[in-house]
Image (tube, coloured by chain):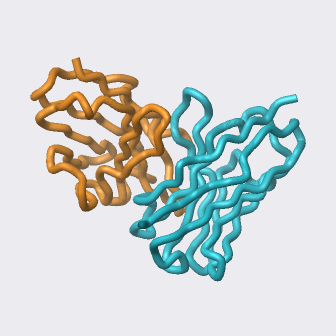
Chain colours: A cyan, B orange
């Protein structure tokens, strides 16, 4: 079964750090670009970051640039998001998503992991 | 870059057809045929319904169709069913090589 499973979410104080992980299974992970998308409580979807299949191309939303770092380990079929200098506005469910077409069609999503930034 | 513009809500009765619009600019929707649509039920992850403007992934009902004219893309759902009640989001590839999402549309089946 094609699947993405996120982990690593939790409660963190403003200014703190958290590392999210996304474990892929059921497909050739190394062939796909991967993304992180977040959704604040009661709000819409916001793209956060993307990484190409070989990590050659990495992009970030302006809202997280300089604070978040995306990475992947194709040998471990895993995607990561290191989040530093966290702010209250980073509170959201974070989803990892596979890009089907290399042009931002996200066909496989994880179940999401909740990140809460609060003192 | 601002989010793509979608109506906050639309509604329709079972069996009817509805259309959700998604308006962007020439730097995103109008510049590329890379518009996607997602369905999201409460508490669930989004599901890809349409990609590349009008393509349906395997397993998605042919009641869902997509189109584009200029800077506006549209999702049409025909033969509305109760299970279609959900939030719908459009997204587009952009000139920055990154995606942008719409604000979302809540579909209510009356």
Compared with B25, A2 (above or below) is: below
| Residue B44, placed above or below residue A22 | above
Quadrant of the drawing holding the C terminus of chain B: top left
Residue A22 in the image: state x and y as whole percent: 63, 61
- Please tell me how many numbered marks the rendered image carries: 0
Q: Residue furthest front?
A: A1
Image quarter of residue A34: bottom right
Residue at the image point whose x is 57% and y is 73% from the top: A52
**Left or right: B42 with respect to A39?**
left
Residue at 67 percent across and 76 percent down: it is A73
Based on the displayed image, in which of its 4 quarters is residue A13 positioned? top right
> Quarter of the image containing the N terminus of chain B?
top right
Question: x and y percent of residue A21 in the render?
Answer: 68, 60
Residue in view at x 46 percent, y 74 percent: A27
Q: Is residue B32 above or below residue A37?
A: below
Q: Nearer the viewer, residue A97 or A26?
A: A26
Residue at 52 percent across and 41 percent down: it is: A45
In this picture, residue B78 sits left or right of residue A40: left
Q: Is residue B39 left or right of residue A37?
A: left
Residue A36 coordinates in the image, percent (x, y): 60, 55
Task: Where is residue A116? Give x, y as percent.
Answer: 74, 36
């Amino acid at each position: 079964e094609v699947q993405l499973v996120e982990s690593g979410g939790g409660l963190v104080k403003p200014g703190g750090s958290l590392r999210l992980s996304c474990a892929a299974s059921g497909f050739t992970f190394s062939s796909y670009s991967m993304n992180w998308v977040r959704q604040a409580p009661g709000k819409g979807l916001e793209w956060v970051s993307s990484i190409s299949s070989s990590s050659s191309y990495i992009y970030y939303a302006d809202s997280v640039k300089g604070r978040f770092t995306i990475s992947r380990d194709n040998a471990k079929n895993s995607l990561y998001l290191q989040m530093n200098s966290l702010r209250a506005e980073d509170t959201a469910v974070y989803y990892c998503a596979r890009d089907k077409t290399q042009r931002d069609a996200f066909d496989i999503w994880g179940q999401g992991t909740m990140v809460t930034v609060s003192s | 870059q601002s989010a793509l513009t979608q109506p906050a809500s639309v509604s329709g009765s079972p069996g009817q057809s509805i259309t959700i619009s998604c308006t962007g600019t020439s730097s995103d929707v109008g510049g590329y045929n890379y518009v996607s649509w997602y369905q999201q039920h409460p508490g669930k992850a989004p599901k890809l319904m349409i990609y590349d403007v009008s393509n349906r992934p395997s397993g998605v009902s042919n009641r869902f169709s997509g189109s584009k004219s200029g800077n506006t893309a549209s999702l049409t759902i025909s033969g509305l069913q109760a299970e279609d009640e959900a939030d719908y989001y459009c997204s587009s590839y952009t000139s920055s090589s990154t995606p942008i999402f719409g604000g979302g549309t809540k579909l209510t089946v009356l």
